[in-house]
Image (cartoon, grey):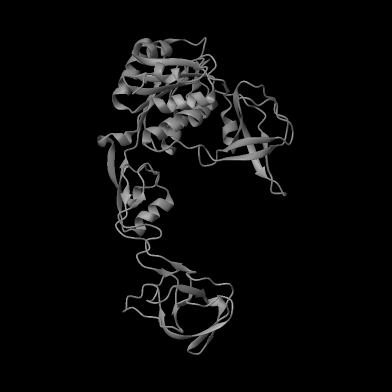
Amino acid sequence: MKTLAEITSELAGYDPQSVHVADVVRTTCALVASLRERPDCTETVGIQDLTGRVLARDVISPISVPPHDNSAMDGYAFAFGEWDGQQPIRLRVSGQRLAGDSKADIEVASGECVHIMTGAVMPAGADTVVPTELCTREGDSVLINGGGLRAGDNRRFAGEDLQAGGIAVPAGQVMHAAAVGLLASLGISEAVVVRRPRVAYFSTGSEILSFGDAPRTGAVFDSNRWVMLSLLRSWGAEPIDMGVIPDDPAQLAEAFTRAAQQADMIISSGGVSVGEADHTKAMMRQLGDVTFWRVAMRPGRPMAVGRVAGCPVFGLPGNPVAVMVTFLAFVRPALQTLMGTVPTNLPAAVARSAEKIRKRPGRTEYQRGVASYGDDGALTVTVLPNQGSGVLSGMVRANCLVVLSHEQATIEVGDAVTVWWLDRFI
């Protein structure tokens, strides 16, 4: 695995005092190795528990899907032959074929057809199905009214979806409802998945209170810890709650060492800003290969990245909104890489700004906003008034982050901006 110096040497114009957001994403993903590569990091899980898990191995289809040529709709199956598909044609109805019908095959002769239901096996000799609505049934015959039908219409071929022995779902797939349903359709009731990544988290700072602590002047209750534990669970990790570590070198060293022994990733918050007590930074430097950045972004400028005892470590800012933004922008893609899947972007949209947003080029900004569709169907976004990185109530009210790119300047009313949807993702 590459060292941090080797990773950052590949970044054009790298400056640790002003790191571009895109370079942070590349670096954080390069720091981690997929658990899918390690045989001791997989487990077999029943289909009822597969949702959200990442496949460790390809799922091979034991059958072809569909297993037989079948009808795509209710209608009449026949041999198209020399018919032009336009002029009306009358055929004798020689039988009926229902979905799931297992009786001996029906053969369609010239001038005949079979009344067939959606999903039913195509009878021998038939290659086309005409929908019921294009037909007029008259006793034991049916008049097909044309309608531009073509040979082979409404016929599903055996194996056109999946071939027996082929890959049904590839390794690295996050198992969502459709993927789970596909396994069920193949008669597969379990799969080998990557175990949930173990991520150790602790807050740092002697001013941080835990539940049950007596309030005191200058101290605040720890919100970051609960924000991070919730985010980690939402994104498929198994969090290891290490509580609050005070600004004490010995306790910080012990926390990093213990975390590296039991986790696949370490996240801390606080202690990485310029002017703060530098015990956290000192311990990271002492114990591992770590660098400290000032990221060209708002909120969340200070950040530490690297490895401690070979374990990826991310030192996030101390303010709760900055913790959430840096997790979503940087740690989340690294976590996805660790889980063995391809990092994804949060769902995004383009909206019209309802107001002027002051912005200077040279940094990426993530502003909390509320987006909605107007009567004209256009998406419009309004930023919330207080964008302070400690204002966690704004993240509760927001349904999106307005992402203003590195090069953008002030946004005028009506200008297009990118929004990241937050609903269901935080």
- Name the residue nearer the viewer: 401 or 227: 401
Where does the N terminus fall, quadrant-wise? top left
- The total of numbered circles placed on residues is 0
Q: Is residue 60 above or below residue 269?
A: below
Q: Residue furthest bottom?
A: 139
Residue 110 image offset from top left, x and y in percent: 43, 83
Q: Is residue 267 left or right of residue 298?
A: left
Q: Residue furthest left?
A: 40
Q: Is residue 223 visible?
A: no
The residue located at (43%, 15%) in the rendering is: 291
The residue located at (44%, 74%) in the rendering is: 117
Q: Is residue 306 above or below residue 93?
A: above
Q: Quadrant of residue 199?
A: top left
Residue 63 image offset from top left, x and y in percent: 31, 60
Q: Quadrant of residue 162?
A: bottom left
Residue 27 image offset from top left, x and y in percent: 44, 24
Q: Is residue 216 left or right of residue 183?
A: right
The residue located at (38%, 55%) in the rendering is: 182
- Name the residue nearer the viewer: 81 or 200: 81
Q: Residue furthest front?
A: 82
Residue 192 image offset from top left, x and y in percent: 29, 45
Q: Is residue 53 visible?
A: yes
- Name the residue nearer the viewer: 248 or 314: 314
The residue located at (40%, 51%) in the rendering is: 179
